[in-house]
Image (cartoon, rainbow, N blue to C red):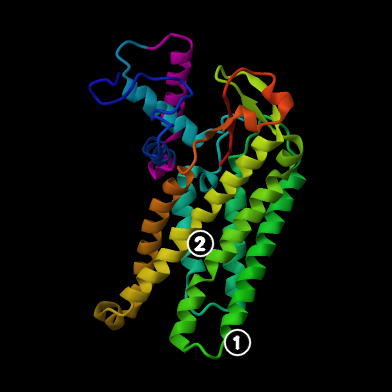
Amino acid sequence: MADSNGYPPFMLGKPRFEQSTFYGRFRHFLDIIDPRTLFVSESRLQEAIQLLEDYKHGTLPPGVTNKELWGAQKIKQAIIHPDTNEKIFMPFRMSGYIPFGTPIVVGLLLPNQTLGSTVFWQWLNQSHNAGVNYANRNATKPSPTSKFILGYTGAVFSAVSIAVGLNVLVQRANKFSPSTRLLIQRFVPFPAVASANICNVVLMRHSELEDGIDVLDSNGKIVGSSKIAAKHALIETALTRVVLPMPILVLPPIIMSVLEKTSVLRSYPRLVLPVQSLVCLAAFGLALPLAISLFPQMSEIETSRLEPEIANRTTSMTVIYNKGL
């Protein structure tokens, strides 16, 4: 039952919000990407860590509230990697994804891109994504660096080749007017980024399809390693990675094509870039929590759909697995 401040009883390592509903997951991820945690001082971080240690060992000072405990856990989870216990480099934290990623999105959507600028912004975007993926990876099992290099290389190659190829096709499409050609070019980043995101997921996590991922019964006990569950996890993650850039790279071009026709931006063309930056920031801030909230972090699958040898090890009707981000 929630206290007078609306905070539920604190549970160490558990989400504050219900994860079985989309709204609960949305609120949970809003907490995770909260950029205010980027400005937490070292002393405040150590206070949060100590408070959680006191809770863990039953030595909490009197008067500590659920609000303070949830706040301490939010700070620690935003800054410290759960497996390595090391601080995550600020631009690669989930809370830094929007502030550090928005300038890249603005660059991707700049009009009249040259070949060089197209390659540069696509490379920078995939480099930032790779940094975020690596910094927030599951580090419980050793993973060769070559796997991340392969995923990064594949993502950069697919993003750059698709973006450049589509731009060349648009430029050679003589039947389009200059204004139509410019509008179409603004949508080029989406298929490039979406395909690169899928490529990145498949290349970096293809070993899961070969080895399977752990599935757990209703008591949290591992009942086996399933390739079928791994396939479902990769499909869900890939879908999330396609949905994520959709509002970020599709909505701003539509909105800007309307705003640029207004008398204000026609009279003050220098305002176009600041306005586009604000539009991209708003789209990014909404799209990120919406996309990663689509599926529960711990997804469920019917036991009968798994490999027979795994299904025979449990009486549970369903099992759960961690799909990853």
Image quadrant holding the N terminus, namely: top left
Residue 32, compared with residue 170, is above or below; it is: above
Disc 2 is placed on an element classified as helix
The reply to whether residue 43 is in sight is: no
Q: Position of residue 166 (x, y in %)?
A: 60, 75
Depth check, front residue: 208 or 86? 208
Q: Where is residue 65 in the image (x, y as percent from the top left)?
A: 31, 19
Q: Nearer the viewer, residue 323 or 229?
A: 229
Q: Residues within 10 Å of mark 2 (few under 14, many from 20)?
A: some
Q: Residue at x 26, y 20 (%)?
A: 3
Q: Quarter holding the C terminus?
A: top right
Residue 231 sits inside the magenta stretch: no
Mark 1, other Cα within 10 Å: few <14 / some 14–19 / many ≥20: few
Instruction: Give above or below for 294 relative to 185.
Output: above
In the rendering, which numbered label is found on residue 241?
none
- Residue 144 coordinates in the image, percent (x, y): 76, 40
- The kind of residue tagged 2 is Ile
Name the residue carrying label 2.
Answer: 104
User: From which residue to which does the magenta span run?
Assistant: 33-60
Q: Residue at x 48, y 54 (%)?
A: 100
Q: In which quarter of the image is residue 160?
A: bottom right
Label 1: which residue? Answer: 172
Name the residue at 50% across, 58% down: 245
**Which of these two is toward me, 27 or 53?**
27
Report which quarter residue 136 is drawn in: top right
User: Amino acid under label 1?
Assistant: Arg
Position in image of residue 16 (x %, y %): 39, 28
Q: Which of 118 and 238 is in front in this view?
A: 238
Q: Comparing marks 1 and 2, which lies closer to the viewer?
A: 1
Identify the element where label 1 is drawn: helix
Left or right: where 7 falls relative to 312: left
